[in-house]
Amino acid sequence: MLTLGFLVALLFGMSPTVYGVLFLPVCVLTALWVREGDLLTAPVVVPVAFALGLVPVADEGDGGTGARLMGMVTGLATQAGWLYGGTLLACAIVLGRRMRMVRTINRRAAARSRAQA
């Protein structure tokens, strides 16, 4: 996301909307690529990655640390819809994968118990 943030700042002139739109496919890919053992971490990592990638996109005003921090807070507040939407997408995909994984485990356990009986 940090690389994507720099790319958006370079190509689109610090457009937080473009960053938010590009954040959604990253959320989907994150939820699809995460290992089955780490499924529940994807919805936690996604908002952290959004905030990290917002650093180059956030308006820094006249410069300085305080202005950068205010730009980050403003960016997080104004782009909350993209953040919530991406997190919701990641949660839905992860929950679907988790349910499929549990169903598969239960089927295997039932087949083993029938084979032993």
Image (tube, grey):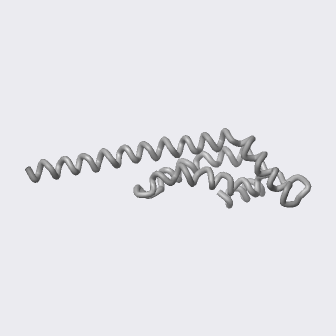
Q: Which residue appears at 35% of the width and 49% of the height? A: 101
Can you say whether 20 is above or below 69 in the image? above
The spot of residue 116 in percent (x, y) is 10, 53
Which image quarter: residue 6? bottom right
- Residue at point 71% right, 42% down? 79
Above or below — where is 98 with respect to 35? above
Determine whether, in the image, residue 9 is placed left or right of residue 25: right
**Residue 112 percent coordinates (x, y):** 16, 52
Of all residues shown, which one is farthest toward the right? Answer: 62
**Which quadrant holds the N terminus?**
bottom right
Residue at image point 48% right, 41% down:
92
* Residue at left offset 88%, top offset 52%: 61
Inspect this view and state whether residue 10 appears.
yes
Observer-nearest of 75 and 65: 65
| Location of residue 87 (image quadrant) | top right
Q: Which residue lies furthest to the left in this view?
A: 117
Q: Which residue lies furthest to the front in this view?
A: 66
Q: Is residue 89 above or below residue 59?
A: above
Residue 78: % across, % down = 75, 41
Looking at the image, can residue 13 be seen? Answer: no
> Front-most of 58 and 17?
58
Q: Which of 92 and 20 is in front in this view?
A: 92
How many marks can you see? Answer: 0
Query: Percent x, y for residue 16?
Result: 74, 46
